[in-house]
Amino acid sequence: MIYLDYSATTPVDKEVVETFSKACLNYWANPNSLHKMGVEAKKLIDASTEQIANILGVKTSEIIYTSGASEANNLAIVGIAEKFQNRGKHIITTNFEHSSVLGPVGYLQRKGYDIDFIDTDENGKIDIDKLRSMIRDDTILVSITAVNSEIGIIEDVEEIGKMLKEFPKLFFHVDITQAVGKIKIDLTNIDLASLSAQKFFGIKGVGALIKKESIQIEPIIHGGKSTTIYRSGTPATQLIASMAKAMRLVSSDLDKHYEYVTNINKKVREELSKYEKVRINSPEDALPYILNISILGVKPEVMQHALEEYDVYISTQTACATKNTESPSVYALTHDKERASSSVRISLSYKTTEEEIDGFIKAFDKCYNKLTNIKG
């Protein structure tokens, strides 16, 4: 089996499973309970939160646990919009956002909010001066992903954050889901940041919204004591402990892992570029963990299922995307409907072996020749 869909979800690390299992067996009491068992469960949550805060460079009080990045994105966007609607209803975002950003943005637009989308250059990069010129007196939120999940475009959110500090009445939200455990991001000038454990070898069902201490938002889940007033519900002790473990594991050797993935990405790029009908959509400076390509004339799901016959697994668009006939992200970048309607995503990991890459290339060659009616 060759798994090349790490950007959709990652397999859970065995050490993370061990941490989760230990917490299930030994810390199963409600951490809100005042008895000894509850106090011990809360201590485990507090220790886990301290570890996550240290890794991300934030305060423990700035971590809001959620069910994942989708909930975190909704909480950030809707939470800010509803809290500060009297200040303004203008929101700025991009065409390269995850559906869990575009979804709540669309919801707010239907409620009367004014949404603007930033133009980007040929590599999907935001012009900071152009962004500055779009800000109005009623702008309350700018939401920009750190790494596009489908193409791998990396936005300079740190520099954008510095610029946005010129406008103290608006807030800056960044989806860092595809960045955690792959690249370092300084959250100093970022007001809110979303992430999910399942993207860095953690268990599905837990994520977080980092919300700077001075910022208030309107909760979207009400009732029930939790670790914060901004998200109700009994704290998921075991999931929180497992996420802390996953983050500790994935945050070590970042540079080493990045270099390794860059090298295998380069090999795949070079090999696939040899095919007449293949177009590489991911820019050269994209995150090497993600490589988006188009096979002209071949439907994405057809190539996906063809590779599946060889026990090779890739993705069409993102796993969370609606089943459109074309990729909005690829179209926004290339302005080419044919490429947008024939794109697939290959996503890598530092755990991807060179043998797996060789196996993928061989399988791709067979599938390409068959599907494009070329004899091989």
Image (spheres, rainbow, N blue to C red):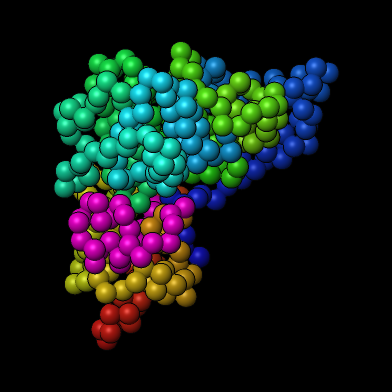
Q: Residue sitting at 25 percent across and 84 percent down?
A: 374
Does residue 43 appear left or right of residue 299 in this picture?
Answer: right
> Eyeballing the image, is 132 above or below 238?
above
Q: Residue furthest top?
A: 214
Q: Residue at x 28, y 80 (%)?
A: 372
Coordinates of residue 90 in the picture (x, y in percent): 32, 30
Q: Is residue 334 above or below residue 126?
A: below
302 on left or right of 244: left
Residue under the image location 27 percent in, 40 percent down: 117
Q: Compare residues 294 and 370 and report the one nearer the observer.
A: 294
Q: Which quarter of the rendering shows the C terminus?
A: bottom left
> Does residue 335 belong to the magenta stretch?
yes
Q: Is residue 55 visible?
A: no
| Residue at the (48%, 36%) spot, across then down | 74
In percent of width and height, residue 125 lies at 21, 40
- Over which residues does the magenta segment extend? 320-348
Location of residue 126 with respect to 160 vertically, above or below: below
Task: Tell me if residue 10 comes above or below residue 139 in the rendering.
Answer: below
Q: Position of residue 232 (x, y in %)?
A: 64, 28
